Amino acid sequence: MTAIGFSTTPSRGTYDVVIVGGAIMGSSAAWFLSNLDDFDGTVLVVERDPSYEWCSTAHTNSCMRQQFSTELNVRISQFAADFVKNIRTYMGGDPRVPNLAIRSHGYLYLANNEGQADVLRANQKIQHAAGAATELLNANDIRARYPFYNVDDIVLGSINTVDEGYFDGAAVFDWWRRQARERGVEYVVDEVVGMTLSTAGNRVEQVKLASGARVSCGHVVNASGPRAARTAAMVGIDVPIEPRKRFTWIFKAEKPLDRDLPLTIDPSGVHVRENGGGTYLAGGHADIDPAVDYDDFAMDHGFWELHAWPAIATRIPQFEAIKVQSEWAGHYSMNCFDQNAILGPHTEVENFFFLNGFSGHGLQQSPAMGRGTAEWLTYGTYRSLDLTPFHYERIALGDPIVEKAVI
C-alpha cells in the first residue's frame, strides 16, 4: 500500500540507519548518505505526515544569512549558499534539477542603543574572519541607501548583500527527497512511538512504529523537528528542545517601495522583507514566548494589530497602508540551552544520533547538517566541516555555545 507515493509498510526488518522524520533535515541526511560512495547501507525514513502540511519545513520563510555570532554558523551558511547556487552540479548534473539562485537583498539588523550596536560590531568581526561581506552602517548611511526607512532612533545597522536573502527551499527539499528515493532510500508513512534498548542500555536495538511494525537498526537519527524531545524521551534522554510559535504574514502595500527591501530585523523583534510583486513578508513572535503544543498553529490576530503592524509602519511609514493577503503560524524547534543545533551521538546511547534544535535556522543549515550527519554515520568523523562543537556532549556538560543572532 502507498500514501502520497510513500509505502506504509517497511520492506525490511532491519536497516542500517532509521531516520525519524522526513522533512528538511531527515531528507538532507538521507540524500547525503545516498550520495556517499563509501556508504552502501540501507536507510529507512519514517514520516508521520507525508503531506508535510504542519512541519516546520512547510512553514519556513526560506531565508539565508551569514550574519551569525559564531564562525561555525557562518561557515555552515556559506556551504548552504554554495549548494543552492550549484544544486544541479551537486546532484550529479541531473537535468531535471532546476538551477536555483539566492535573492540576495540582504539582512539588515537595526540597533537602537549602544548595547545592541556593540553586539553588531562584535558579530561583524567574527563574520569578516569567516569571509562574510558584512557592512556596518550609521543612520545616514542607511538613509542614503534606503530612504524609505525611519531611522531617527537607530544607532547602527549591519547588512550583507552577498548570499543573504531568500531562496526556493521547497525545491531543495523536493529534490533531496526525490533523488534519495530513486537511489534506494525507503520512506514509509508511519510514526515512531517507541524504541527498545539493548540489555546494557547503550544502543537502540529496535524501533516500534504506530502501525505495530518493528524494525531493527544500526543507527537512529532523531530528525523530528519540534518533536525532538518526545523522540529522545523514548530512550530516556532529556533534550532541551521545545516547539515555539512563530507568526508570518504576507501583505500588499498600497504604495510599494521603489527598491528591494532587505530582510529588516527591527529592534522591536519584528522582521520584514521583500516578497515580490509589491508584496512583502513579515514575521515575529510575542514577548511572552512559551512552549506550545505540537499541534497548536492558531494565529494571534491581536499581535499583528497591536505590535507587528505598528512596528513595521513606524519603521517604514510607506507601509501604513497595507492589506494582509495570507498568514500562518509555524514552529521553531527551539534549543532552549543555547539556540544552536544539537548533533552527534548521545554520550551513553551510542547509536542514537541527534539532528535537532536549529532554533529557526534549519532550512539554511540543512545542507551542512545533512552532509555532516552522513559523514559521521559513514566514517565516524567529519570530513568536510567540523561540527563537533555542536555535539550533544556540551548539553551533558552544561557548556553552551550561545548564538546571539536569533530572530
Image (spheres, helix red, strand yellow):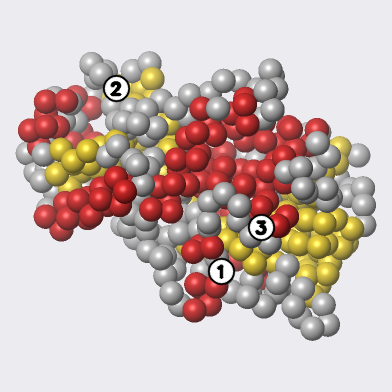
**Residue 35 in view here:** yes
Does label 2 or label 3 sit earlier along the sequence?
2
What residue appears at the point 80 percent right and 33 percent down from the top-left corner? 182
Q: At 14% from the left edge and 32% from the top edge, which residue is drawn? A: 142
SS for tag 1?
loop
- Residue 392, which numbered label? 1
Query: Marks 2 and 3: CB-CB under 8 Å?
Result: no
- Expressed as whole percent of the image width and height from the top left, the position of residue 94 reads 70, 22
SS class of the residue under badge 2?
Answer: loop
Tell me: 330 left or right of 25. left
Q: Quadrant of the N terminus?
A: top right
Image point 31% across, 48% down: which residue? 129
Q: Nearer the viewer, mark 2 or mark 3?
A: 3
Report the residue marked by disc 2: 260
Rendered image: mark on residue 376: 3
**How far across and down, in percent of the image, does residue 122 sit?**
23, 54
- Dot 3 falls on a residue whose secondary structure is helix
Disc 1 from disc 3: Cα separation: 14 Å
Q: Position of residue 345 (x, y in %)?
A: 64, 67
In the depicted structure, whether residue 128 falls above or below residue 166: below
| Neighbours of disc 3 within 10 Å: few (<14), some (14-19), many (20+) | some
The residue mark sitting in front, 1 or 3, is 3
